Amino acid sequence: MVLSFPAGSSGGPDGLRPQHIRDLIMCREAGTNLLGALTAFVNLVLSGRCPEEMTPVFFGGRLLALNKNNGGFRPIAIGFTLRRLASKCANSFGISRPKAYFYLQQLGVGTPGGCEEAIHAARRFLESLPANSILVKLDFSNAFNSIHRRDMLSSVHDRIPELYPYCYSAYSQASCLFFGQYIILSKQGPQQGDPIGPLLFSNTLHPTLSSLKASLNLGYLDDIILGGTQSVVAADVKRLLKRNVFKRDLKPDSVSLCKMYAGSLFQIDGQHRMSKPVITAG
């Protein structure tokens, strides 16, 4: 699992990079012993036995604020390498469990090429879009950091109980994110940058996603595509804005990007083809 880190992966607050561990376990003299010790340590963390007084630091990280193309910032937490290693192991085990549960709706987790599948499905839907139907693409602002951790942990307990001890240890209390000279407490949602974060987010959101009534209902993490009659899609959007898995109700201005396609506005060679969205907001 150490070898699965991308080349050049950054270190957490302690500066230890995955490449440092990779080089050490390749050592002929002590590599085998180190690998055994690492395995024992990761198993200890996965079992939820990280000392409670250490969890705010160990499950914290170095915070980066990346600029978004459409304005604003995307907060990325770069955790300690040993914590990320444990999360990678947990994610590798857990991602196969809800795969059938997610499939055909949540394509951001457990579905190789899920982004391409979502694009092709939306394109096929647009090519035969009826006159009274619309297709809407929603991208919610700061969705990862708005989710209730209580509901997130409850969803893990219900559907991936083997990971509950680890997730409870990591997310049952606030952790420390170091941003320059400041310390910011992480209290909501999975951290963006945690390898298991997408699984935790999708597992929590999926009951709401699967309850929507639109004919086309796809999610790629927090990007959601809905297609169907105008009244059904409008009702689904309202339901999404009021879903109770979030720490706060999402208001209309929580949608950082909204694209809407409507049928019968362009007709080429007898087929409905949309060359651009009718409405783009964000």
Image (tube, helix red, strand yellow):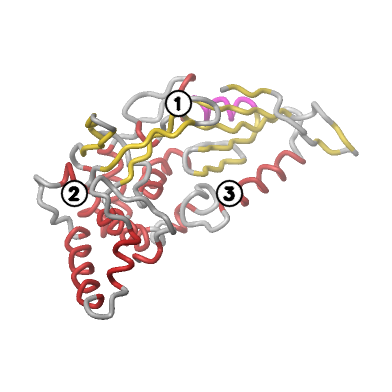
Residue 53 is covered by the magenta coloring: no
Span colored in magenta: 230-239
Q: Residue at x 56, y 43 (%)?
A: 218
The alpha-carbon separation of the residues under discs 1 and 2 comes to: 30 Å
Type of the residue with mark 1: Leu
Q: Nearer the viewer, mark 3 or mark 1?
A: 3
Residue 115 is labelled as: 3
Please give the name of the residue rendered at 33% of the width and 41% of the height, measured from the top-left corner.
Answer: 77
**Numbered badge on residue 241:** 1
Mark 3 to mark 2: distance in Å? 32 Å
Q: Are marks 3 and 2 in contact (CB under 8 Å)?
A: no
Which residue type does callout 2 highlight? Ser
Q: Which residue is mark 2?
A: 169
Q: Residue at x 58, y 27 (%)?
A: 258
Where does residue 146 sit, x and y in percent of width and height?
35, 31
The secondary element bearing badge 2 is classed as helix
Is 261 left or right of 256, judged from the image as shown? right
Q: Is residue 72 above or below residue 157?
A: above
Secondary structure beneath dot 1 equals helix
Instruction: Indicate which disc, 3 or 2, sits on the residue closer to the N terminus.
Output: 3
Where in the figure is residue 163, as x and y percent of width and height?
27, 56
Distance between the alpha carbons at the discs numbered 3 and 1: 23 Å
